[in-house]
Amino acid sequence: MRVDSLRAVTEARLVSIEIDATLRTAAGAFSNPRIGLLVVRDGGGNAAGIISKSDIIRHLREVGVTDAPVADVMIRAVMSCHPEDDLYVTWQKMATLGLQNMPVLSTEAKALGVLDVRDVLKALFEHEEYEERLLINYVSGVGYQ
């Protein structure tokens, strides 16, 4: 199973902002509860970094300026995945790093979506249930259904 199998979900979670946007603009994008991560775009439309709710809160606690540019707060070393990546391997990477969200990027660094760990776990669980039903049907002599 590949990351691309969740394309509809990852595309729906994608919200991106320009690198010169303010933290106030970024905070407004987080008003949707399904959004946990913003992809920050450079002038060419490529992913230059990411920003999370926690990044904004940390900045506000330490500095308190909401009109600061996103570039001052964003994470530049982005852990990402690609559509052709294995979903289970990607989940393992997310779990190891303690990530709730991960951007899905093209090979050209264009943002294609945002993968949420809950969606990954749900898809992996449903796949395992399907495999189990097939095995039960096979063992009981029903055949594949």
Image: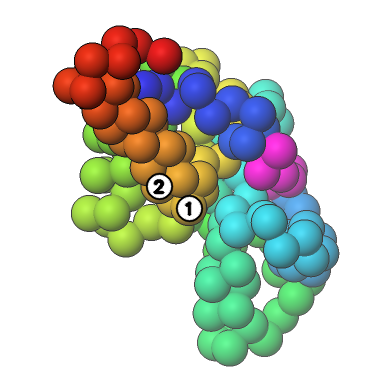
Q: Is residue 131 visible?
A: no
The residue sitting at 48% across, 52% down in the picture is 118
Label pair 1/2, CB-CB below 8 angstroms: yes
Q: Is residue 3 above or below residue 69?
A: above
For residue 33, say whether it is visible.
yes
Q: Please state which amino acid type lies under the numbered disc 1.
A: Arg
The single residue placed furthest to the left in the displayed view is 139
The stretch in magenta equals 12-19
Q: Could you say where residue 29 lies in the image, as x and y percent from the top left?
A: 78, 58
Residue 27, located in which quarter of the rendered image?
bottom right
Q: Is residue 106 above or below residue 36?
A: above
Viewer-proximal residue among 54 and 33 = 33
Count neighbours of disc 1 (C-alpha within 10 A) and say few if under 14, some if 14 to 19, many if 20 or more.
few
- Residue 8 placed where, x, y %? 65, 29
The residue indicated by pointer 2 is 121
| Residue 110 on image: x %, y % | 59, 24
In the image, 70 versus 9, the foreground residue is 9
Q: Residue at x 67, y 24 (%)?
A: 44
Kindly identify the amino acid type of the residue bearing the numbered disc 2.
Answer: Leu
SS at circle 1: helix
Residue 133's tag is none
The reply, left or right, for residue 101 in relation to residue 133 is right
Local crowd at mark 2 within 10 Å, few (<14), some, or many (≥20)?
Answer: some
> Which residue is disc 1 drawn over?
118
Split into 4 quadrants, where in the image is the N terminus?
top left
In space, the residues marked 1 and 2 are separated at their CA atoms by: 5 Å
